[in-house]
Image (cartoon, helix red, strand yellow):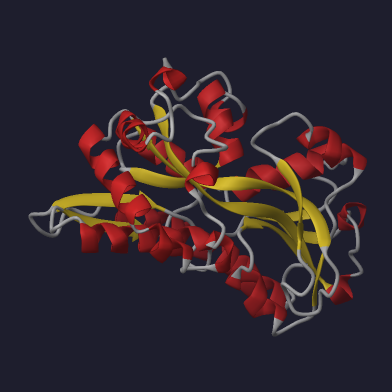
């Protein structure tokens, strides 16, 4: 049943991305993630700003999609105008690492950074899982193929010597499916990379007791060290029901990406509208409250899109020689 649901999710995402334009205004599509995740909410809110403040020039839609890897490939393949993606996945795509091994995506471009995302390991309290090593022999959702969290989960398990085929029972669901599965007792734990607080954790935590597992061991500290697209952080105490102490972990930063296929004027307009109405974007979710231009121009691991660069030059936020 879960496999069937995942297949249907993939088919639905493909159909959504290929849907034809519905009116004469220029159509824009932003690829997001699971419908319960912050990517989807942010993409929709950016589109709402564009639709309200572009003077009828654009019709923007935030679309549920499969996450960072999927969005980067869809953007560089011309299926999406913009996509939400993690900073580490942008770096890997640009240099031809991980899912893009030996095939760097030369057309990928950054628009701006967004909220911080923490890598989380969440377990049922009655599972007995209190550390990464306790995952051996357990039923664990590692995230759907095409998502950033899938890569984060695989990194963590590899760093701790896990063989996915032998050491645990791995599932590959999107996060809204994993949230239901942990409540139903179909899995013992799941990995998730998201801005906090996330409904995909908060909602199931009101239905069954969940515990956040620390991700700050020596292997992870060494892995994160020296990488500008990672940062050590923590999930504050009380963020989720039943977790009254801060949970140390590491994180990435969400970003909006585009490609050289996307016209300069379009990227300029979207960038300008977002920054001119940044207060409205900040009000969407607690994870966005701290956004400033300085933060939004940091952690950009792919080159700037010329449209975004043009706006930042006009505002004096970057110097002309920065990207020479």
Q: Residue furthest front?
A: 316
Q: Is residue 287 left or right of residue 56?
A: right
Image quadrant occupied by the C terminus? top left
Q: Is residue 286 visible?
A: yes
Residue 3: quadrant of the picture: bottom right
Say above or below: 254 vs 35.
above
Q: Residue 150, image x and y in percent?
A: 64, 47
Say above or below: 307 vs 202.
above
Considering depth in this image, is 162 or 293 the residue closer to the camera? 293
Image quadrant occupied by the N terminus? bottom right
For image coordinates 62% across by 74% down, the residue present is 180
Q: Residue furthest top?
A: 324
For image coordinates 66% across by 57% down, the residue present is 192
For image coordinates 83% across by 51% down, the residue present is 215
Q: Residue 201, image x and y in percent?
A: 66, 71
Q: Is residue 18 visible?
A: no
Considering depth in this image, is 216 or 311 the residue closer to the camera? 311
Say above or below: 95 vs 6.
above
Q: Is residue 225 left or right of residue 271?
A: right
Q: Residue 109, image x and y in percent?
A: 41, 31
Residue 8: quadrant of the picture: bottom left
Q: Residue furthest bottom?
A: 207
Say above or below: 303 vs 268.
above
Considering depth in this image, is 184 or 282 the residue closer to the camera? 282
């Amino acid at each position: 049943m879960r496999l069937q649901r995942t297949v249907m999710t993939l088919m639905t995402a493909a159909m959504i991305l290929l849907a034809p334009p519905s009116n004469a205004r220029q159509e824009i599509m932003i690829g997001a993630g699971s419908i319960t995740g912050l990517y989807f909410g942010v993409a929709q809110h950016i589109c709402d700003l564009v639709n309200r403040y572009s003077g009828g020039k654009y019709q923007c839609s935030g679309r549920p999609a499969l996450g960072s890897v999927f969005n980067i490939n869809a953007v560089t393949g011309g299926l999406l105008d913009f996509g939400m993606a993690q900073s580490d996945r942008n770096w890997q795509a640009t240099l031809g690492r991980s899912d893009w091994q030996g095939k760097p995506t030369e057309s990928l471009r950054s628009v701006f950074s967004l909220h911080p995302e923490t890598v989380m390991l969440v377990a049922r309290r009655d599972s007995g899982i209190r550390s990464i090593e306790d995952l051996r022999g357990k039923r664990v959702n590692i995230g759907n193929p095409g998502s950033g969290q899938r890569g984060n989960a695989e990194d963590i398990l590899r760093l701790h010597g896990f063989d996915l085929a032998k050491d645990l029972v791995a599932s590959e669901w999107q996060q809204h499916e994993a949230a239901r599965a942990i409540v139903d007792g179909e899995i013992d734990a799941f990995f998730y990379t998201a801005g906090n607080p996330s409904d995909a954790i908060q909602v199931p935590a009101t239905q069954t007791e969940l515990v956040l597992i620390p991700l700050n061991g020596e292997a992870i500290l060494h892995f994160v060290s020296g990488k500008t697209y990672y940062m050590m952080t923590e999930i504050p105490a009380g963020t989720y029901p039943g977790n009254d102490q801060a949970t140390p972990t590491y994180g990435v930063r969400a970003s909006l990406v585009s490609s050289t296929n996307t016209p300069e004027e379009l990227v300029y307009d979207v960038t300008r509208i977002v920054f001119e109405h940044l207060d409205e974007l900040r009000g969407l979710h607690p994870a966005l409250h701290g956004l400033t231009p300085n933060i939004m121009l940091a952690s950009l691991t792919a080159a700037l899109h010329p449209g975004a660069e043009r706006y930042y030059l006009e505002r004096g936020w970057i110097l002309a020689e920065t990207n020479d």
